[in-house]
Amino acid sequence: ILTIQGLLDGVYEANFFDTWTGEYFLTTQSSSTYGFLSISLPSLSKSDFAFKVYLKGTSQDSTSNNNDSSDNQIPTINLEGKLIELLPLDKNPVKINENKEIKIKFLVNIQVPSKVKVTIYDLNMNIVKELTNGWLKVSHPYQEFMWDIKDKNNKEVSSGIYIYKIDIINDYKVKDTKLNKIMIIR
């Protein structure tokens, strides 16, 4: 049994797929009550799989033609739309002798498990440092990552302009990307 908590009450559809081939091999429906969804899984011969869970009746449900505009309808997020909103840096330009790290802050607008990749580049788009390449906490829109103003070899970077890039990835595709500049001064 697979149990997920923190969901809205309603009927959910779970689609399971092989992470190597991307082929769907199981679809099941279950109801959530009091924020908990339990899905009974048959014994699976696949050891490496992932799943997507959709609330039935939303735009993610391709079989629904529900055009009800009542207050009970759950708003959905278009995953092809704006997923990231950058927040201003605390300081820019950044003086190395006054700051030991930079906080990169942003808001995400997602409802499905997604990966985030935050990478620092120089102006020639050479990778200076990759800050993260992991799963986001879907439960909270505010995200932040710290850059210690060092490169991937743990050496302080020189003065100049750097670019940070944030990618939101799900279904093995980059769904949204944002870029911004940071000026480093000695």
Image (cartoon, rainbow, N blue to C red):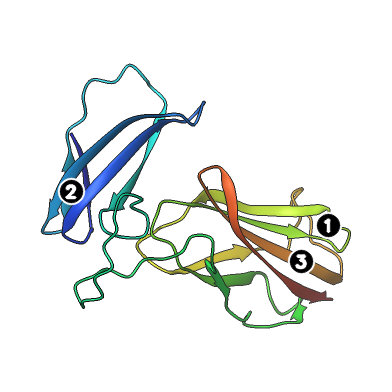
Q: Which residue is mark 1?
A: 125
Q: In the image, is 92 to the left or to the right of 38?
A: right
Residue corresponding to mark 2? 37
Disc 2 residue type (three-letter): Leu
Q: Quadrant of residue 101?
A: bottom right
Q: Residue at x 55, y 68 (%)?
A: 84
Q: Is residue 60 left or right of residue 107?
A: left
Q: Residue 148: x percent and y percent?
A: 67, 63
For badge 1, the amino acid type reads: Met
Q: Earlier in the sequence, mark 2 or mark 1?
A: 2
Label 3, label 1: how far apart the Cα atoms are: 8 Å
The residue at 42%/26% (across/down) is 48
Report, in whole angstroms, how far the alpha carbon at label 2 lies from the one at label 3.
Answer: 41 Å
Q: Secondary structure at mark 2?
A: strand
The one nearer the camera, 29 or 135, is 29
**Is there a contact, CB below 8 Å, between mark 2 and mark 1?**
no
- Dot 3 falls on a residue whose secondary structure is strand
Looking at the image, how many numbered discs can be counted on the residues?
Answer: 3
Compute the Cα span from label 2 to label 1: 44 Å
Q: Is residue 132 visible?
A: yes
